Amino acid sequence: MSESLHNNPLAETIQALYPEDIKIIGEDTQQCLLVERERLLDLVQVLKHDECYQFNMLRNLTAVDYPDYLEIVYHLYSLPLRQAVLLKTRCLAENAEVPSVTAIWPSANFQEREIYDLLGVVFNGHPDLRRILLPDDFTGHPLRKSYTTGGRRN
């Protein structure tokens, strides 16, 4: 870990909430917090409701398919405090499940459905997790690296 990882006071403050379950990853302006998925809901509750953070806006929610895992990425913003933070959590491709954050940020609803549709991540607790872009009878999740069509890997 380089020295630059210790220069973001906001990230350090949040990391201190759950030092065993949150790590600061990345460098310089690309720093973010990697949280264990079991702690995700605890952390986002604090980040939204605690007066010190007030992350009342989920700007974006996306996911990335890496060779060994899927990474779910949360871009949060506090309108009152004008600060942003980037959270990530990971799950295995074979057991792609993470808790839904729709109860905390209703705007996550369609974004979680899109990730489910295209990458196959199941958001436990989502109120209406079904396909949003592809037909209901579509087989597979086309943004997965393992997805194939016609017997050929794309």
Image (cartoon, rainbow, N blue to C red):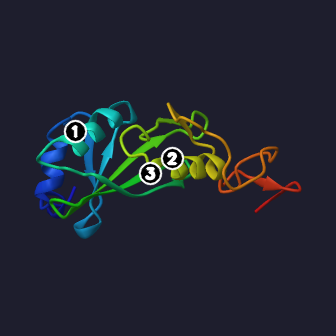
Near mark 2 (Cα within 10 A), the count class, few <14, some 14-19 or many ≥20, is some
Residue at x 16%, y 37% (from the top left corner)? 17
In this rendering, the answer to whether 5 lies above or below 89 is below
Measuring from the top left, give residue 2's x and y in whole percent: 19, 60
Q: Which of marks 1 and 2 is nearer the N terminus?
A: 1
Instruction: Residue 18: give its label.
Output: none
Q: Nearer the viewer, mark 3 or mark 1?
A: 3
In this rendering, the answer to whether 42 lies above or below 138 is above
Mark 2 sits on what residue? 109
Near mark 3 (Cα within 10 A), the count class, few <14, some 14-19 or many ≥20, is some
Mark 3 sits on what residue? 107
Measuring from the top left, give residue 72's x and y in whole percent: 46, 49
In the image, 82 versus 75, the foreground residue is 82
Q: Which of marks 3 and 1 is nearer the N terminus?
A: 1
Q: Describe the element under mark 1 as helix, strand or loop.
A: helix
Residue at x 57%, y 50% (from the top left corner)? 115
CA distance for labels 3 and 2: 5 Å
Residue at x 17%, y 59% (from the top left corner)? 80
Near mark 1 (Cα within 10 A), the count class, few <14, some 14-19 or many ≥20, is some
Instruction: Residue 46: give its label.
Output: 1
Amino acid, disc 3? Ser
In the image, 117 versus 90, the foreground residue is 117
